[in-house]
C-alpha cells in the first residue's frame, strides 16, 4: 500500500485509544492509517473527536500539547468530505451519534470503517451491501490489503 492508499474512516474511540496506549493495536492502526492510507474526516467526525479529546478525564493520561498535535496532524493529513444530504438523512444505528461515521464512509467510498464501537460492529454484515466494510482495529491489522508492517 502506498501513502496514497485507500480512504479509511476511523471512529473517535480508535483515535483516542491509539493516543492513550501507544503500543496497543489501536495505536498501531492509527500510525498505519496516518502513514499508509487516506484518513477521512467530515465536519461532524472531527467535531466529535475534538470535543472528546478535551474531556478532563484524559488530563492525567495525555498532555494538552499531545492532543493539540493529534488534531493538527489529523486535520492536515486527512481527506475532508462533505456528506450529501441524501446520505446524511439515512439512519443506521440505534445510537444516532454513530451514524456520522457510516455517513463519512459512504460519502468517501472508504475501504474501511475502523471502530471499537459494538453498535457499529454489529451492523457490519448489513452495511457490507452498501459498500461499507466495518472492522475492529484487531480485524483491520489482519487484513491482507492493509499491510501494517512497513
Image: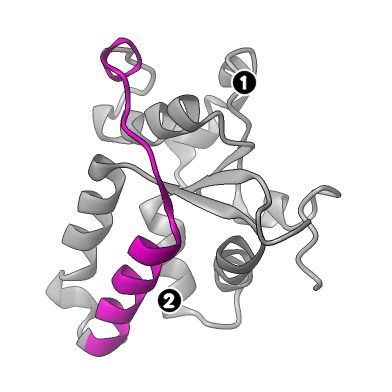
Q: Quadrant of the C terminus?
A: bottom right
Q: How far from the left and from the top, in percent, is residue 93?
A: 36, 23
Q: Which residue is mark 2?
A: 19
* Quadrant in which residue 64 is drawn: bottom left
Q: How far from the left and from the top, in percent, is residue 112?
A: 61, 39
Per the image, label 1 sits on a secondary structure element best described as loop
Camera-side residue: 112 or 109? Answer: 109
Instruction: Report the span colored magenta.
Output: 65-88
The residue positioned 26% from the left and 15% from the top of the image is 85
Q: Which residue is mark 1?
A: 131
Q: Quadrant of the N terminus?
A: bottom right
Q: Is residue 57 above or below residue 118?
A: below
The residue positioned 56% from the left and 46% from the top of the image is 8
The residue positioned 16% from the left and 59% from the top of the image is 51
Q: How far from the left and from the top, in percent, is residue 107?
A: 44, 26
Mark 2 Cα within 10 Å, few/some/many (few <14, many 20+)? many
Amino acid at each position: 500500500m502506498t501513502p496514497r492508499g485507500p480512504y479509511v474512516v476511523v471512529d473517535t474511540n480508535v483515535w483516542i485509544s491509539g493516543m492513550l496506549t501507544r503500543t496497543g493495536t489501536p495505536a498501531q492502526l492509527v500510525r498505519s492509517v496516518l502513514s499508509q492510507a487516506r484518513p477521512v474526516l467530515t465536519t461532524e467526525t472531527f467535531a466529535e473527536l475534538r470535543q472528546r479529546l478535551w474531556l478532563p478525564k484524559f488530563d492525567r493520561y495525555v498532555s494538552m500539547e499531545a492532543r493539540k498535535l493529534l488534531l493538527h496532524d489529523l486535520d492536515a493529513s486527512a481527506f475532508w468530505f462533505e456528506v450529501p444530504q441524501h446520505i446524511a438523512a439515512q439512519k443506521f444505528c440505534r445510537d444516532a451519534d454513530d451514524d456520522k461515521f457510516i455517513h463519512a464512509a459512504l460519502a468517501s467510498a472508504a475501504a474501511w470503517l475502523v471502530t471499537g464501537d459494538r453498535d457499529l460492529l454489529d451492523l457490519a454484515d448489513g452495511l457490507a451491501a452498501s459498500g461499507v466494510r466495518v472492522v475492529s482495529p484487531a480485524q483491520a491489522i489482519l487484513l491482507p490489503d492493509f499491510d501494517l508492517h512497513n
